[in-house]
């Protein structure tokens, strides 16, 4: 691919580019996307399981995500729906610069028109892109939630300060090492992040005030701040994770399954907040199983299966299965409890085939595994 | 019959929950528990399955308290599967915790053989949840408590798992008590709804 091919496209003229059509509300600030992922592939090095002699087993790459394209415009909420175990969380992790040690990640990611590499993506975590992680296990079990949300960083969060909140999987340090070792390490952290000036700057009240505001908004009593994660109910922990992400006033939110455990009203409120967030000129990538809720707020829906985006469609097309193109998308429609709650026969095959091809993280190879990720 | 009689429960230093809740569920019944987030639905599930003991009141099965030894006839499938499995064990060992899981049951739940040698962190939430369901069914429960078991599943898998679970419950006469935040799913499944 020609370097910066994406930047050379005249966005105002080309109606379809990057494999998608535009929603009406989306727009390009300064002629580029807020977040653009092109040709992303993720594979894991794992031992050949068919080899009977354990110590002779060779390492082989297993591709989990292949050639994935997705873009988020300013002012847009893009929903990714799809099969469980198809690698949706890996996509979120890749954008956040979190990688398993045995993962090889290829592809190109632009944030705010600036091409990123692994180190700069990790630096953006919490300084432009925030993650609402899927599992409540991402909270530190030994730290009171109030302190976790505040972070021990001050304004303009330094590297150490974000660690717990924004890349809680501990991946960041690993990543830096991982890419520090490669010869081809490209422009490093500072250069890139300095260029990515926020599109919209918000006056920052003190973090404590912001915390109180967020708690009030999500019906969390102030004493919750003084509790440990195990003392929270599932829904409360979810809201705490939401607060973590919104605290840092990001440009893009990657929300990985933000609604399970929330009752309907809270889930709607959370999604309406994402909508409002997007309407203020920022972007949201919403990864979810809950098609019904996603359709309420999304501008575009990308259906994810077999490790890639199989169909990108307008929200309106979900009104009837006839307007959906891919058999898996139609199967999703039919399986919804408010429709048939039935699994069509071919869909079972499609779904299991999906699971077979693209299961999640395979067996981790030993610690000496090749750290051969390419810069994104 | 599974009975909750005059339940009172409070976590240390926190407000009391339930305020003398009484209800019962028969086998063949599918009871939905409905309440806002944080109202104690998961706590009630843990009480019913014997993971927690109420401060006053009782959980009775056919008029007798839950047994202290042996396999509990009320099995709980937890809301967060990643917290319900031992992260140091391989999936095969986790499956075996509840009893023998037949290959047929594995197949019905869509558990693939190659997952069995993996550790929990190498599977997605939806995949883990199928193991947890298989493990609960292997214990031959009389009642199954399902605490938001399908929120991490995509719609196709959700429909598939629930159809399978309903078949298993019907065939074995297992009573089902479940929590779901999706009104559509509740309408589909519940024979009765209890508001906490």
Image (cartoon, rainbow, N blue to C red):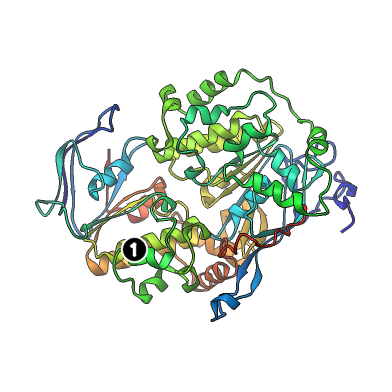
Q: Nearer the viewer, residue B100 or B157?
A: B100
Give the left or right position of residue A66, taking residue B62 as reference. Answer: right
Residue at 57% x, 53% y is A319
Q: Element at badge 1?
A: helix
Q: Position of residue A103 (x, y in %)?
A: 66, 59
| Figure check: A112 above or below A358 | above
The chain letter for the residue carrying disc 1 is B
Q: Nearer the viewer, residue A292 or A356?
A: A356
Residue at 55% x, 44% y is A133
Residue topped by disc 1: B135
Kindly give the residue lying farthest to the bottom in the view shown.
A52
Q: Nearer the viewer, residue A101 or A155?
A: A101
| Image quadrant in which you'd find residue A63 | bottom right
| Figure check: A82 above or below A280 | below
Q: Nearer the viewer, residue A315 or A199?
A: A199
Q: Position of residue A290 (x, y in %)?
A: 51, 50
| Image quadrant in which you'd find residue B16 | top left
């Amino acid at each position: 691919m020609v370097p910066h091919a994406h930047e050379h496209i005249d966005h105002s003229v080309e109606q379809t580019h990057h494999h998608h059509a535009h929603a009406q509300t989306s727009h390009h600030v300064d002629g580029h996307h807020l977040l653009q992922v092109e040709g992303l592939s993720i594979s894991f090095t794992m031992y050949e399981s068919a080899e009977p002699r354990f110590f002779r087993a060779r390492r082989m790459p297993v591709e989990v995500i292949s050639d994935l394209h997705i873009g988020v415009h300013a002012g847009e909420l893009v929903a990714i729906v799809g099969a469980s175990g198809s690698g949706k969380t890996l996509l979120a992790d890749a954008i956040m610069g979190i990688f398993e040690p045995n993962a090889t990640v290829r592809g190109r990611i632009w944030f705010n028109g600036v091409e990123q590499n692994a180190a700069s993506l990790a630096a953006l975590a919490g300084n432009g892109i925030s993650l609402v992680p899927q599992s409540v296990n991402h909270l530190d079990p030994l730290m009171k939630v109030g302190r976790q949300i505040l972070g021990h960083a001050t304004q303009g969060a330094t590297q150490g300060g974000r660690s717990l909140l924004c890349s809680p999987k501990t991946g960041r340090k690993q990543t830096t090492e991982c890419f520090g070792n490669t010869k081809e390490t490209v422009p490093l952290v500072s250069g890139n992040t300095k260029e990515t000036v926020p599109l919209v700057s918000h006056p920052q009240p003190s973090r404590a005030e912001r915390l109180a505001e967020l708690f009030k908004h999500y019906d969390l009593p102030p004493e919750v701040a003084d509790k440990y994660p195990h003392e929270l109910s599932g829904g409360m922990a979810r809201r705490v994770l939401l607060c973590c992400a919104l605290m840092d006033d990001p440009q893009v939110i990657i929300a990985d399954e933000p609604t399970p455990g929330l009752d309907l009203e809270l889930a709607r409120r959370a999604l309406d907040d994402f909508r409002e967030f997007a309407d203020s000129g920022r972007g949201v990538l919403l990864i979810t199983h809950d098609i019904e809720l996603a359709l309420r707020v999304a501008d575009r829906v990308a259906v994810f299966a077999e490790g890639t985006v199989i169909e990108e469609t307008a929200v309106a097309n979900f009104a009837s299965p006839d307007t959906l193109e891919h058999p898996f998308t139609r199967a999703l429609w039919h399986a919804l409890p408010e429709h048939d709650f039935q699994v069509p026969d071919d869909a079972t095959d499609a779904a299991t085939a999906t699971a077979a091809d693209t299961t999640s993280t395979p067996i981790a190879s030993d610690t000496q595994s090749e750290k051969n990720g390419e810069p994104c | 019959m599974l009975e909750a009689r005059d339940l009172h429960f409070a976590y240390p230093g926190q407000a009391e929950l339930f305020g003398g809740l009484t209800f019962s569920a028969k086998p063949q019944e599918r009871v939905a528990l409905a309440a806002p987030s944080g109202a104690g639905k998961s706590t009630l599930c843990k009480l019913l399955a014997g993971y927690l003991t109420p401060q006053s009141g009782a959980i009775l099965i056919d008029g007798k308290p839950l047994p202290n030894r042996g396999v509990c006839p009320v099995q709980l499938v937890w809301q967060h599967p990643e917290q319900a499995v031992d992260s140091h064990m391989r999936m095969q060992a986790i499956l075996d915790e509840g009893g023998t899981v037949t290959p047929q049951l594995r197949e019905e739940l869509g558990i693939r053989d190659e997952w069995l040698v993996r550790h929990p962190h190498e599977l997605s939430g939806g995949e883990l949840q199928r193991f947890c369901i298989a493990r609960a069914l292997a214990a031959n429960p009389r009642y199954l408590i399902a605490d938001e078991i399908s929120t991490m599943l995509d719609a196709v898998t959700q429909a598939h798992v629930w159809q399978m679970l309903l078949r298993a419950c019907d065939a074995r006469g297992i009573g089902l008590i479940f929590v779901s935040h999706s009104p559509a799913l509740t309408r589909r499944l519940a024979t009765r709804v209890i508001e906490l």
